[in-house]
Amino acid sequence: MPILKVARMGHPVLRQVAGPVPIGSISSDKVQQLIDDMIDTCREYSGAGLAAPQVHVSMRVLIMEIHQNPRYPDAPDLPLTVVVNPQVEHLDPTRQMVWEGCLSVPDLRGQVPRSTGVRLTGLDRHGKPIDITLRGFPAAVVQHECDHLDGKLYVDRMESMESLTFLGEFERYVRPKLVEEVNEN
Ligand code: NI
């Protein structure tokens, strides 16, 4: 199955508001192939999630999956979740600061304020309704992927550019502190 090329920051497709998928076309070969290719592409590049605009398709489709991810070794597992026409409801006003990266903004990490809990609704790849609640890092992932569908990147959400860090420096100077914090708690 083809690994798709990932659009990088600056490509106009990342700034478009993606269009909804007509319910009747979810089962089409085109949409099903897109979903399969997004899964392969996300796994190939060790993404925690991927939105269709990132593979140059301006449609409201996202996938998420976290399982022993080398780019996010501290993240909890999240089973493969495919959502068509997703909607996110913020469950509480509490914000968490999350270190995020993005396959469209390669080799960088930055801290982004995100809701600690969200309700995610939409349709799965068979057109069946999804209604799940996510907290912590997975909640941040879904907010990040839904932002892609509205033409937003995580860097737009950063309150300060001070935390913007290259991945190599993140591994060297930031992750050891995060691991310490986890061990202390
Ligand atoms: Ni992203």
Image (tube, rainbow, N blue to C red):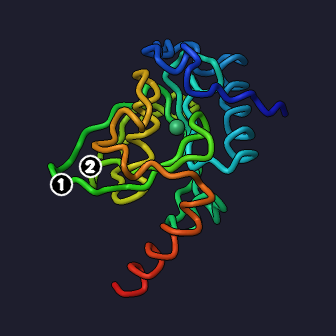
Disc 2 crowd rating (10 Å Cα; few below 14, some 14-19, many 20+) is many
Measured as percent of width and height from the top left, residue 131 is found at 36, 43
Q: Which mark is residue 16?
A: none
Tally of numbered discs: 2
Quadrant containing the N terminus is top right
The residue lying at 38 percent from left, 40 percent from top is 143
The residue lying at 58 percent from left, 68 percent from top is 172
SS at mark 2?
strand
Q: Nearer the viewer, residue 165 or 93?
A: 165
Image quadrant where residue 126 sits: top right
Residue that sits furthest to the bottom in the current view: 184
65 in relation to 61, above or below? below
Q: Horizontal placement of 114 versus 39: left or right?
A: left
The tag earlier along the polypeptide, 1 or 2, is 1
Q: Nearer the viewer, residue 18 or 35?
A: 18
Measured as percent of width and height from the top left, residue 146 is found at 41, 33
Disc 1 crowd rating (10 Å Cα; few below 14, some 14-19, many 20+) is few
Residue with the mark numbered 1: 94
Residue with the mark numbered 2: 115
Q: CA distance from mark 1 to mark 2?
A: 6 Å
121 in relation to 167, above or below? above
Image quadrant where residue 6 sits: top right
> What kind of residue is marked 1?
Thr
